[in-house]
Amino acid sequence: MADGNITKDAMYGAVAPDDFESMLTLDRYGERSTAFDKIISATHDHFWDPLDKRYIDFDEPFDLENVAMMPEEQQPLLRLPYVAETLTDPKERIAFINYLQLRNFSSILHGEQGALNLSASLCHVLYDQGAQEYAANQTREEARHVTAFAKYVKSRWGRPAECGATLKKLLVEIIEAPEVYKKIVGMQMLVEGLAMGAFANGFKYNRDPVARKLFQLVMTDEAFHHKFGKIWADRTIPKLTEGERNLVEDWTAHCAQSLLFDRGDPRQSAEIYGKFGLDPDRVIADIVQRRKERDPTRKFKGETNVFRVLIKTLLKAGLITERTRGFYAAYVDLDELAAEGERMVGDDIAEDGIRYLQEINFKDRTRAVSIAAE
Ligand SMILES: [Fe+2]
Ligand SMILES: [Fe+2]
């Protein structure tokens, strides 16, 4: 199995996506890795169902016309001089903030669909049965995230917005990649890392209680998905040759470039400005001006800042070395991140969520048993 997968641990061994015959190898059945068993069995503790109102009720209303989902301080666009002087009507500002949230939730929905297809694609390539069971379990969890976010978007806006070009390109790239390291780094480390930051931020600031509940429920699952990527990194990265390490690091930087920097390119949002009577060129000129005036040594701060959360994940996983340090150091203080503990911002939110789910799931064991017997 020496190939482009850069496998350093048998449990992450992989075959080509179309090589089903290898799965029928008899010895394989007896060599199941137990490394993921804890994550697999924990799935019962954090079980939830987006179609069951005991967990979340998408019929609870929210007044999108009169209440901004996010506080204005969380929308730096509204502080641009041109935007501030054009959008003066409070209702218009609310509409602008809430439209940005439609775009945000739509990106999340498309990202969850990407995670579903990616984890399903892992089932085809991972050779170890335990790793495969893990991937199948993640696929099932991603499927409920797609259901949940689709229901949420439908209840609030009716229909999602298109997937942005940069995100679409990256999702297609990692789902189609046959190499396991590209899938795991791209999805489990980068996309999941970014999602944990975005969900933590939404959990903290979104004014819609249904949205906050949704973020928390999803985070109870995502924390484990992220762990799968972390176990891969811990067992793989220290054993890489220099050449392999460079490949993995460059792929990491490529994904980070797409997710963090290209996606933030204001030209991608021209459609939004036009919708609110704003001249996209003037908005972009303001953004460029603000970036010029910004202190170049200023770094992203705040424990739920998505850039910071994601880059910390990569740093702790050993996916950033001296070679690529400069690329990230322009945005965050890497020494400060290195000095912080392993705990991630989403961990506490996910743990509270699991306790909430355990209460619902195990409140009435006799009922669960009787249903199972029906
Ligand atoms: Fe997900
Ligand atoms: Fe996930």
Image: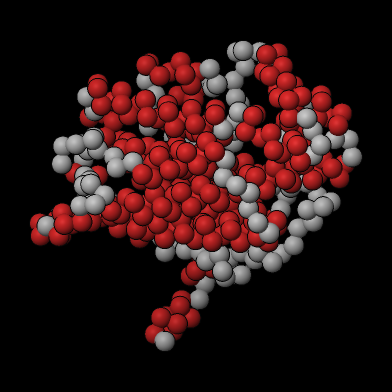
Question: Can residue 291 be seen in this snapshot?
Answer: yes
* Left or right placement of residue 259 versus residue 65 in this view: left
**Residue lying at the far left of the rendered structure:** 27
Q: Is residue 13 above or below residue 247?
A: below
**Residue lying at the far right of the rendered structure:** 89
Q: Nearer the viewer, residue 213 or 264?
A: 264
Residue 260 appears at what percent x and percent y?
53, 31
Quadrant for the C terminus in the image: bottom left
Question: Can residue 42 be seen in this snapshot?
Answer: no
Q: Residue at x 46, y 55 (%)?
A: 142
Q: Nearer the viewer, residue 279 or 145?
A: 279
Q: Residue at x 15, y 54 (%)?
A: 22
Quadrant for the N terminus in the image: top left
Residue 255 appears at what percent x and percent y?
44, 32
Which of the colour schemes (rainbow, by chain, secondary structure, one colour) is used? secondary structure
Count of numbered labels shown in the rendering: 0
Q: Nearer the viewer, residue 203 or 67?
A: 67
**Residue lying at the far bottom of the rendered structure:** 374
The image quarter containing residue 316 is top left
* Left or right placement of residue 5 versus residue 215 in this view: left
The image quarter containing residue 275 is top right
Residue 364 appears at what percent x and percent y?
50, 76
Q: Residue at x 54, y 27 (%)?
A: 261
Residue 191 appears at what percent x and percent y?
47, 40
Q: Residue at x 37, y 29 (%)?
A: 251
